[in-house]
Amino acid sequence: MSVVVRLPSQLRSLVGGAGEIPVEATTVREAIWAVEEGHPGLAARVLDDQGSLRRFVNVFVADEDVRFLDGLDTLVAPGQTVSLVPAVAGG
């Protein structure tokens, strides 16, 4: 069974407009790269040159922020959702 990568509207143009992409993955990192395989350009938008998560991108697995778990190595179980969420700033 696959996991679902949920994408914000800012990234949907990279994946043909889809809001969710099902992929086979066991970690957040694998999920991002699985989407990248079918839709080149996504990884560059969410990962920096060292392969780390960009500061302005938040990632959640089952509503838990991966920065407080194991980061990109956070495990994802079949059926779970990995949500890519841009940071919101303003005042």
Image (cartoon, helix red, strand yellow):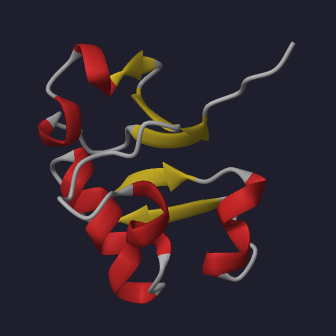
- Residue 69 appears in the picture as rendered: yes
Q: Is residue 45 above or below residue 40?
A: above
Q: Quadrant of the N terminus?
A: bottom left
Residue at left offset 38%, top offset 38%: 80
Viewed as shown, does residue 40 lie left or right of 50? right
- Number of labels in the image equals 0
Q: Nearer the viewer, residue 16 or 79?
A: 16
Task: Give residue 66's quadrant in the image.
Answer: top left
Residue at left offset 26%, top offset 13%: 68
Residue at left offset 47%, top offset 71%: 42
Viewed as shown, does residue 58 lie left or right of 23? right
Q: Position of residue 15 (x, y in %)?
A: 62, 78
Q: Position of residue 75 (x, y in %)?
A: 15, 36
Q: Quadrant of the C terminus?
A: top right
Q: Is residue 34 above or below residue 2?
A: below
Task: Give residue 51's quadrant in the image.
Answer: bottom left
Task: Give residue 88's quadrant in the image.
Answer: top right
Q: Nearer the viewer, residue 90 or 64?
A: 90
* Name of the residue lying farthest toward the right: 91
Viewed as shown, does residue 24 lie left or right of 63? left
Viewed as shown, does residue 61 lie left or right of 76? right
- Residue 1 appears in the picture as rendered: no
Q: Is residue 64 above or below residue 37?
A: above
Q: Position of residue 36 (x, y in %)?
A: 38, 77
